[in-house]
Image (cartoon, grey):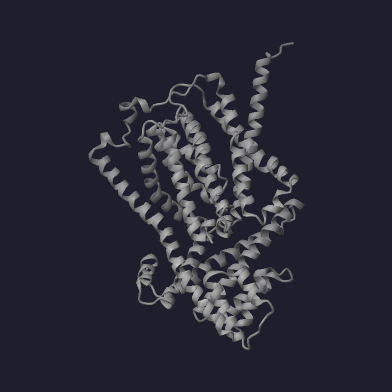
């Protein structure tokens, strides 16, 4: 009886295993992206945070009239009156509130599906409870904005809807809604521990409005004076934070637009020296690559890495954390939360190094240029910084388009609560280390150093840049980030292709994440 040689059998087993892992990876990506659709975009939350910051700064006209602070505020947010800003803020909150209610309705429909198993029902129940809490929080603030625009009846109706929505399962935001409704009712109804509850669930402009009304009802005028003094301090802080937030897109985007204009003029009138010249590989053979393996090896490395990534993040690390009871402590300790971002990230991406070592062993020594990190030539600095400014306007534009298309859905960023709620600098430094050092090194090494490089064996350079950028975005497992990160990945791919130095794309990646990190700190930091 004929039998296959042992090496052929091992190849068949290897191919079968790779096929199974590929299928599981694809299914995991699909289900994860589908799950992210049920979560609000962090961009939507960031928009509301910026709205809240602007409201906090609107007190400038009342606290420090006719001075330079008022002029700075007008430059940052426009020439509209305070009432216009309140109306715009109310419109933003009502839009987010409407989207939240639509999403809650969709979750209710899914929960009524009789084919769901117990785990799926439990997951939907948690998502529904989280959505209800989010709607209640937004409703509390929406009502205060309605009060400011003169719609007292509408505000009371908004707070009543919170009570109806939560029913017997009253959250802290539901209790705040009852307190606010009582304060603006006729006659006024005061609840015990109202001040503590307001301070716990409201901040900034909203807290000041609610506490002012409470102190007026309690006839505590000295407390109102203290609020006014605190507001003067908060106005200056809010304006400084708005200046930082606006400087990144305005300055970065402005330089980026100018850079693109220069590149366009260069391409039209001096095409031979343009970095976009299609004949650049012929004129500059040093930017060509030699790839000794085929697409199968490339796919094998990516699938094995993604499998290891999923195993670490979904099974191994959660079991370790549960065994050590780390999750319980993390709920109250932002430093632990930050460590639970940094350490799992490094442990989940570092398996790519032994996977690359084993998969590429038959092809060693590798041809010149692979995984090049070269400090001696400073051209990587110019490519990295120039690439950053070129990316800013592109990513900003596609982010707006993506946000409109997804209608506020598409997933969130787990780092936001740590950045917005933590008052300790150590957690923020640990997060910055994750974003600006670990992520640029590991992700550029894999997606640009290996994947982009390898795809040029089967695709034109532009196709390899585009596809590697898409895989880079897909690996973040967040549907809201796919379009913006694809564009960013393509820019980083182009920068790496032309510089032939991973330091250039790593620098671009570091600058991008650091800029985003700084904006988040300014926007939501305490």
- Percent position (x, y) of residue 86? 47, 74
| On screen, residue 39 above or below 142 | above
- The residue at 52%/48% (across/down) is 432
The single residue placed furthest to the bottom in the displayed view is 187
Res 110 visible? no
Figure quadrant of residue 461: top left
Q: Quadrant of the C terminus?
A: bottom right
| On screen, residue 322 above or below 171 | above
- Percent position (x, y) of residue 33? 59, 48
- Using the image as rendered, state which of residue 285 and residue 249 is in the foreground: 249
- Percent position (x, y) of residue 201? 62, 69
- Using the image as rendered, state which of residue 35 and residue 363 is in the foreground: 363
Total marks placed: 0
| On screen, residue 327 above or below 61 | above
- Using the image as rendered, state which of residue 40 and residue 385 is in the foreground: 385
The single residue placed furthest to the top in the displayed view is 1
| On screen, residue 429 above or below 349 | below
- Percent position (x, y) of residue 360? 55, 23
- The residue at 66%/84% (across/down) is 189
The single residue placed furthest to the left in the displayed view is 269
Res 264 visible? yes
- The residue at 62%/34% (across/down) is 22
Figure quadrant of residue 416: bottom right
Q: Quadrant of the N terminus?
A: top right
């Amino acid at each position: 009886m004929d039998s296959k040689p042992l090496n052929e059998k091992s190849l068949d087993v290897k191919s079968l295993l790779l096929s199974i892992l590929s299928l599981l990876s694809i299914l995991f990506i699909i289900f994860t992206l589908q799950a992210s659709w049920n979560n609000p975009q962090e961009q939507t939350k960031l928009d509301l945070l910026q709205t809240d910051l602007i409201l906090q700064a609107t007190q400038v006209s009342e606290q420090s009239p006719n001075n330079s602070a008022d002029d700075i505020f007008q430059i940052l947010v426009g020439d509209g009156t305070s009432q216009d800003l309140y109306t715009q803020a109310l419109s933003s909150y009502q839009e987010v509130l409407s989207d939240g209610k639509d999403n809650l309705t969709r979750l209710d429909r899914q929960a009524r599906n009789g084919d769901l198993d117990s785990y799926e029902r439990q997951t939907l129940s948690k998502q529904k409870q989280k959505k209800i809490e989010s709607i209640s929080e937004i409703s509390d603030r929406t009502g205060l904005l309605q009060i400011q625009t003169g719609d007292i009846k509408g505000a009371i109706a908004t707070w009543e809807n919170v009570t109806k929505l939560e029913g017997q399962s009253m959250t802290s935001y539901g209790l705040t809604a009852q307190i606010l409704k009582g304060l603006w009712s006729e006659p006024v109804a005061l609840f015990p521990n109202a001040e503590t509850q307001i301070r716990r669930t409201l901040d900034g402009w909203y807290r000041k409005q609610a506490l002012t009304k409470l102190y007026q009802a309690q006839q505590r005028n000295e407390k109102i004076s203290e609020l006014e003094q605190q507001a003067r301090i908060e106005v200056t802080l809010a304006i400084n934070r708005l200046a930082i937030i606006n400087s990144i897109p305005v300055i970065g985007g402005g330089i980026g637009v100018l850079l693109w204009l220069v590149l366009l003029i260069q391409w039209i009138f001096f095409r031979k020296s343009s970095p976009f010249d299609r004949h650049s590989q012929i004129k500059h053979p040093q930017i060509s690559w030699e790839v000794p393996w085929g697409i199968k090896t490339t796919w094998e490395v990516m699938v094995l890495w993604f499998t290891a990534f999923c195993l670490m993040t979904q099974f191994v690390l959660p079991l370790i954390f549960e065994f050590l009871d780390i999750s319980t402590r993390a709920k109250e300790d932002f430093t632990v939360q930050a460590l639970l971002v940094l350490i799992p990230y490094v442990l989940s991406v570092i398996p790519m190094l032994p996977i690359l070592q084993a998969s590429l062993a038959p092809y060693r020594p590798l041809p010149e240029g692979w995984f090049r990190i070269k400090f001696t030539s400073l051209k990587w600095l110019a490519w990295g910084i120039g690439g950053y400014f070129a990316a800013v306007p592109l990513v900003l534009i596609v982010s707006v388009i993506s946000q409109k298309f997804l209608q506020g859905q598409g997933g969130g960023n787990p780092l936001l609560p740590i950045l917005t709620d933590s008052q300790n600098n150590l957690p923020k430094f640990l997060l910055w280390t994750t974003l600006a050092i670990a992520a640029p090194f590991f992700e550029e090494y894999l997606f640009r150093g290996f994947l982009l490089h390898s795809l040029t064996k089967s695709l034109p350079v532009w196709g390899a840049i585009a596809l590697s950028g898409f895989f880079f975005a897909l690996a973040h497992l967040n549907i809201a980030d796919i379009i913006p990160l694809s564009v960013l990945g393509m820019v980083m791919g182009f920068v790496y292709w032309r510089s032939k130095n991973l330091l250039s794309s790593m620098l671009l990646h570091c600058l991008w994440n650091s800029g985003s990190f700084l904006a988040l700190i300014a926007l939501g930091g305490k």
